[in-house]
Amino acid sequence: MTDGENGSVYHIAIAVKNLEEAEKLYTKAVGLKVTHRETVEDQGVKAVMLKPESKEGTAIELLEPTNDNSPISKFIEKKGEGIHHICFYVDDLEASLKVLKDEGMRLIDEEPRIGADNMKVAFVHPKSFNGVLVELAEIKKD
Ligand code: CO
């Protein structure tokens, strides 16, 4: 289930060392509910998505590395645990990527790929977004 409108924040992703502990914090102390779990071995990431009870509003995505070569391991090594990326909903991902390319922005994904929850997503390099790793996710139309 997805919601949101063009430009609204879909989720804020946080790199954590211990997913179980972090999950407890966000469910017990903040009251969020787990909506999705996924391990993406080839990216070395174990992810949990949490949302408010109504399933509306901004989600929190917790990311734990599954091995030392994971980009999440590298992130935690360099910066410690913390906010890893912000994901925005967009109406038309191809169109957004084209705008960014035309502006000479650095893209991590030149083409959309399938991310969590079968959504079309693409990452933009933090160098092109004021130091913030930005993920764009296309709003599902069905
Ligand atoms: Co994300």
Image (spheres, helix red, strand yellow):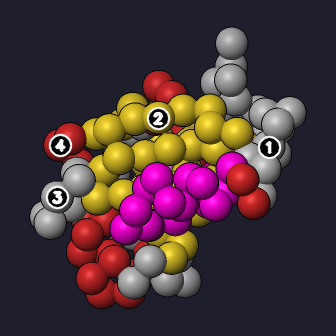
Q: Nearer the viewer, residue 45 or 91?
A: 45
- Is 79 placed above or below 67 here? below
Tell me if mark 1 has few (under 14), some (14-19) or many (20+) residues whose alpha carbon lies within 10 angstroms of its own: some
Relative to 121, is 23 on the left or the right? Answer: right
Q: Give the numbered dot on residue 131.
A: none
Q: State yes or no: residue 12 in magenta.
A: yes
The residue segment tinted magenta is 11-27
Q: Nearer the viewer, residue 33 or 41?
A: 33
The image shows residue 80 at horizontal and vertical percentages of: 39, 84
Q: Disc 4 to disc 1, how far (Cα)?
A: 29 Å
Q: Give the numbered dot on residue 67.
A: 3
Q: Can you identify the residue that label 2 sits on?
A: 37
The image shows residue 140 at horizontal and vertical percentages of: 64, 24
Tell me if mark 4 has few (under 14), some (14-19) or many (20+) residues whose alpha carbon lies within 10 angstroms of its own: few
Three-letter amino acid code of the residue under disc 1? Pro
- Is 5 placed above or below 83 here? above
3 vs 4, front mark: 3
Q: Earlier in the sequence, mark 4 or mark 2?
A: 2
- SS at mark 3? loop
Q: Is residue 11 visible?
A: yes
Three-letter amino acid code of the residue under disc 3? Asn
Three-letter amino acid code of the residue under disc 4? Asp
In the picture as drawn, the residue positioned furthest to the top comes out as: 142
Q: Can you identify the residue that label 4 sits on?
A: 42
Q: Can you identify the residue that label 1 sits on?
A: 52
Identify the residue shown where x is 70% and y is 29%. Answer: 2
